[in-house]
């Protein structure tokens, strides 16, 4: 008998109980419930409580925990579902394996995002699989490994970057059934990217422990076009966090490029290295960084709104400290300079820069 595999569940999007974290802890809001019914999800059809409620015009009291999804992060249980008229028994997995939870969010129009954008919203280690005659398998989490992701972190983990069909590696289609099976190296890929994505120290430590204990000898594999590996993915992730879903603004790009091209105006010598969006090991990125032949360096923070320049001054101080650490220097070494460049600095930002020796320069675009 082959080794039991890890599994991934297909979950209908549920925003019940959603805040900083993904929902899946209460009944969907009326908007999402209506969208799920209109999208034709199997359990949201026919005589389901949600379909009845939508058909009544969303009037009266909404159903309470009508599906697996609405209680997922309360109960930590999910079912194998069915294929046609046949309830599925999950023979290929076992307790101790990992279950990924995936969904497709709604886009700005309220319609489901395409299958290629399926995200990973959490995971758990399987504690028990309950198989009863005539019923689909019920998979329950153990108590030690349960991870529910914040929305912004879930949006950075694409299921199809890790899973592929052996018969057709280019196929991006879930098809029937709620479950797909993953190999150790595919699950290891998820864990390595998850560790580099999450910000919560406890979650990060839990993921690292899983890697060390269960996947230490497993080489992770990545399949998707978005997953190019190394710093490129990390830079994309932290770029989203730094600038938000709208991306970097035009004015910020222009001012950052001006710094990149006009280092001498800042009193800096000819550099041996310069880079925009310089990524530190911590995941933080300086807008521009320079390194010089004499072993010195500079890190620059750019702001385009005077309101944010005090925050920018704090960022410049952080980048200077991180650069010192990267170069193996004392964190207050004069060999590394921190800069803040903005069209105009607030009074508070100027005072902070003077106190902590952050160089500043005002440049109007």
Image: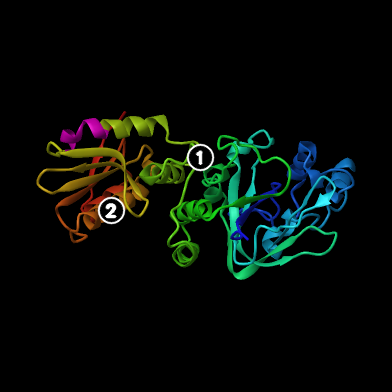
* Marker disc for residue 278: none
Of all residues, the one furthest to the bottom in this rendering is: 143
Tag 1's secondary structure?
loop
Please tell me whether mark 2 or mark 1 is closer to you in this view: 1
Q: Quadrant of the N terminus?
A: bottom right
Residue 94 seen in the current view: yes
Q: In this figure, what is the number of numbered marks?
A: 2
Q: Is the residue marked by circle 2 packed among few (<14), some (14-19), or many (20+) residues within 10 Å?
A: many
Residue 247 position within the rendered picture, expressed as x and y whole percent measured from the top left: 46, 36
Write down the region rendered in magenta: 259-266
* Marker disc for residue 224: 1
Which picture quadrant has residue 268?
Answer: top left
| Residue 264 in magenta stretch | yes
Q: Quadrant of the C terminus?
A: top left
**Which residue is under mark 2?**
317
Q: Earlier in the sequence, mark 2 or mark 1?
A: 1
Residue 329 position within the rendered picture, expressed as x and y whole percent measured from the top left: 18, 59
Of the pair 34 and 139, the residue shown nearer to us: 139
Residue 185 position within the rendered picture, expressed as x and y whole percent measured from the top left: 49, 53
Of all residues, the one furthest to the left in this rendering is: 294
Of all residues, the one furthest to the front in this rendering is: 1
Residue 100 seen in the current view: no
| Residue 192 in magenta stretch | no
Residue 10 position within the rendered picture, expressed as x and y whole percent measured from the top left: 68, 48
Of the pair 101 and 138, the residue shown nearer to us: 138
Overall secondary structure of the magenta section: helix
Of the pair 74 and 19, the residue shown nearer to us: 74
Relative to 236, residue 134 above or below: below
Give the left or right position of residue 3, taking residue 226 as reference. right
Label 2 vs label 1: CA separation?
A: 37 Å
């Amino acid at each position: 008998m082959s080794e039991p595999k890890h599994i991934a569940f297909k979950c209908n999007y549920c925003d019940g109980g959603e805040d900083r974290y993904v929902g899946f802890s209460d009944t969907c809001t009326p908007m999402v419930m209506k969208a799920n019914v209109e999208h034709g999800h199997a359990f949201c059809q026919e005589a389901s409580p949600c379909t009845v409620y939508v058909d009544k015009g969303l009037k009266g009291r909404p159903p309470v925990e009508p599906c697996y999804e609405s209680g997922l992060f309360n109960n930590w249980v999910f079912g194998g579902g069915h294929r046609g008229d046949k309830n599925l028994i999950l023979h290929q997995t076992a307790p101790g394996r990992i279950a990924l939870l995936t969904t497709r969010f709604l886009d700005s129009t309220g319609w489901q995002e395409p299958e290629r954008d399926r995200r990973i919203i959490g995971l758990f280690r399987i504690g028990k699989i309950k198989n009863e005659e005539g019923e689909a398998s019920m998979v329950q989490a153990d108590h030690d490994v349960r991870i529910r992701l914040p929305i912004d972190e879930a949006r950075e983990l694409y299921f199809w970057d890790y899973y592929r069909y052996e018969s057709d590696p280019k196929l991006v289609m879930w098809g029937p059934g709620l479950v797909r099976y993953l190999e150790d190296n595919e699950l290891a890929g998820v864990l390595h990217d998850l560790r580099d994505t999450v910000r919560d120290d406890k979650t990060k430590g839990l993921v690292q422990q899983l890697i060390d204990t269960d996947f230490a000898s497993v080489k992770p594999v990545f399949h998707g076009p978005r997953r190019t590996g190394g710093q490129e993915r990390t830079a994309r992730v932290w770029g989203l966090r730094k600038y938000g879903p709208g991306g970097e603004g035009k004015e910020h790009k222009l001012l950052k490029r001006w710094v990149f091209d006009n280092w001498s105006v800042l009193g800096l010598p000819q550099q041996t290295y310069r880079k925009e969006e310089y990524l530190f090991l911590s995941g933080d990125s300086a807008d521009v960084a320079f390194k010089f032949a004499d072993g010195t360096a500079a890190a620059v923070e750019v702001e385009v709104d005077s309101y944010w320049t005090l925050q920018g001054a704090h960022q410049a101080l952080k980048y200077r400290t991180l650069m010192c650490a990267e170069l193996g220097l004392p964190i207050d070494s004069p060999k590394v300079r921190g800069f803040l460049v903005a069209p105009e600095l607030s009074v508070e930002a100027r005072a902070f820069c003077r106190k902590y020796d952050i160089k500043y320069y005002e440049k109007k675009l």
